[in-house]
Amino acid sequence: MKTLIMTFLLIFLAELGDKTQLATMLMAAKSDCVWLVFLGSAAALAASSLIGVLAGDFIARYIPQSTIHFASGIAFIIIGILLVCGKI
């Protein structure tokens, strides 16, 4: 249950105000049926999440968790530096 709650909170907070949410708001503003926009955007998020889960599971089978953590940390540091320098 803890994993479910943490996953929900992390994804929910990460998605607030991003370009996907903005695109969904624009689609809803132009649509006659906001429920179809909701269903389409929910299905798209579920599909992209499924790809992420399957890819993560596949990677975890062949690469040790410590290596994944180290590589993730390095990637976030690089992204942070690039953001601070205005390269992204």
Image (cartoon, rainbow, N blue to C red):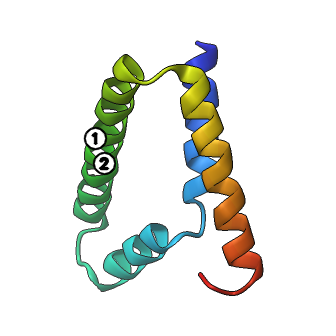
**Which residue lies under the disc numbered 2?**
48
Q: Is residue 60 left or right of residue 71?
A: left
Instruction: Assess whether mark 1 and mark 2 are in contact (beta carbons under 8 angstroms).
Output: yes
Three-letter residue code for mark 1: Ile
Q: Quadrant of residue 54?
A: top left
- Residue closest to the eye, 53 or 3: 53
Furthest-right residue in this view? 84
Q: Please say if 62 is above or below 80.
A: above
The residue drawn where x is 35% and y is 24% is 57
Q: Is residue 15 left or right of residue 82?
A: left
Secondary element under disc 2, as helix, strand or loop, is helix
The residue drawn where x is 29% and y is 37% is 50
- Residue closest to the eye, 21 or 28: 21
Q: Please say if 1 is above or below 46.
A: above
Q: Label 2: few (<14), some or many (≥20) within 10 Å?
A: few
Furthest-top residue in this view? 1
The residue drawn where x is 35% and y is 18% is 61
In the image, residue 64 lies at what x, y percent? 50, 20
Q: Please say if 35 is above or below 69.
A: below
Image quarter where the N terminus lies is: top right
Query: Any mark on residue 18, and which?
Result: none
In the image, residue 45 lies at what x, y percent? 34, 50
Q: Quadrant of residue 46?
A: top left
Q: Is residue 28 left or right of residue 39?
A: right
In the image, residue 9 lies at what x, y percent? 64, 38
Three-letter residue code for mark 2: Ser
Image quarter where the C terminus lies is: bottom right
Q: Spatial distance from mark 2 to mark 1, Cα to Cα?
A: 5 Å
Count the marks: how many? Answer: 2
